[in-house]
Image: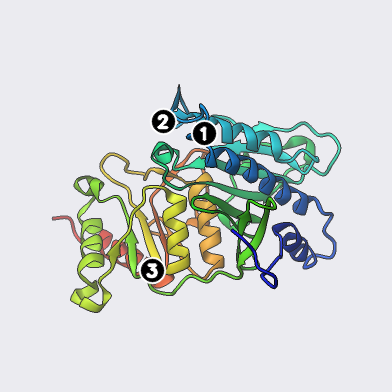
Amino acid sequence: MTWEPGANLTTVESHILEMQRLHPSASGDFTSLLNDITFAAKIVAREVSRAGLVDILGDTGAQNVQGEAVKKLDEYANRTFMRCVGKRGQVCALASEENEDPVFIAPAEGSGRYLVLFDPLDGSSNIDANVSVGTIFSISRRLSPRDRVSSQDLLQPGRNLAAAGYVIYGSSTMFVYTTGYGVHGFTLDPGIGEFLLSHANIRIPFSATVYSTNEGNEPDWGPAVREIVRQLKHGRAGQAETRMAARYIGSLVADFHRNLLHGGVYLYPGSRRHPQGKLRLMYEANPLAFIVEQAGGYASDGRRAILDIPPRALHERTPLYIGCRDTVLWIEQCLERAAGEPAG
């Protein structure tokens, strides 16, 4: 990307500092933590961009806590974020989708005020085919005294998040984040190595025009979900003007990013094989739900807002319906009506 004179040259670092000014009592720890995350993202972006040129494609031969094959880039991204994030004493705990247990950081210099959860490389099963992948992260504040941090500090509902964001590694690398004051996107200029503001104050359309779901799972869906997808295809209540196009990449960050910008809904319901859903509440659903609500959208597990779910475990799974507010609320209402109907 070449930035012409007069183009927006606001870097993500300067934008984060602007956000800090909304909190006059801020210590700067939160700002430096976000800067750590953007630095890690640049390192991962570099490796993703040359993955076909070095021995970093394919599986490691191991499985993660989810029982999934670990890609070499999964391992690299996980290691990079674990090493880069919170090195200035801002963090008391880190948790990764790739690791069974969180890492609690012993008190030392710094506030130790924050906890960071992340999915280091979402969609990595597609990386060998050169499909866009991404990183998802969330930041919350410690509730316990500094020397008594526990897993309960990590198991906070999404409403408690201080920030969330994702990085998409595609034809360009984008960093999208919110601290509760709108959603902003930055595109990496590889020539200068900086994320520059390219999408200020992102707002998702009220109603979706596309839907994203893995229709290969249709035999395992319940009748209510099948009917919802049928109406998305053929028109809600038979109205042809509400028909939607299908767009499914199979990489959550990529599907979510497109729907956020252009207006869509993403569905990963519970199924016969995965009654509780397949996506992770803490690492995927909560951060993206926080982002989409800040952009004017909505996320649900089919019964309630994702952000209101009280977590029970770090690797808990959930159904996910996320995107344009009107469409997700309609899906929620359809599922509620179906649940209230007598069996048979």
Toward which corner of the image does residue 225 lie, by quadrant? Answer: bottom left
Q: Which image quarter is the N terminus in?
A: bottom right
Tell me the element at label 2.
Answer: loop
Q: Which amino acid does label 3 sit on?
A: Leu
The residue positioned 79% from the left and 50% from the top of the image is 29
Q: Looking at the picture, how far across and down is residue 274, in whole percent?
A: 32, 41
Residue type at mark 1: give it: Asp
Q: In terms of secondary structure, where does tag 1 sit?
A: helix
Numbered mark located on residue 163 in the image: none
Which residue is painted at 41% across and 36% down in the image? 128
Q: Which of the two discs, 2 and 3, sits closer to the camera?
A: 2
Task: Answer with the quarter of the image where residue 94 lies.
Answer: top right
Q: In this figure, which residue is indicated by the disc labeled 3?
A: 329
- Image quarter (top left, top right, bottom left or bottom right) of the C terminus: bottom left
Is residue 161 in view from this perspective? no
Instruction: Pick whichever of labels 1 and 3 is earlier in the sequence.
Output: 1
**Position above or below: 317 against 8:** above
Residue carrying label 2: 68
Q: Mark 1 points at which residue?
A: 74
| Residue 160: image location, x then y, percent | 62, 55
Of circles 1 and 2, which is in front? 1
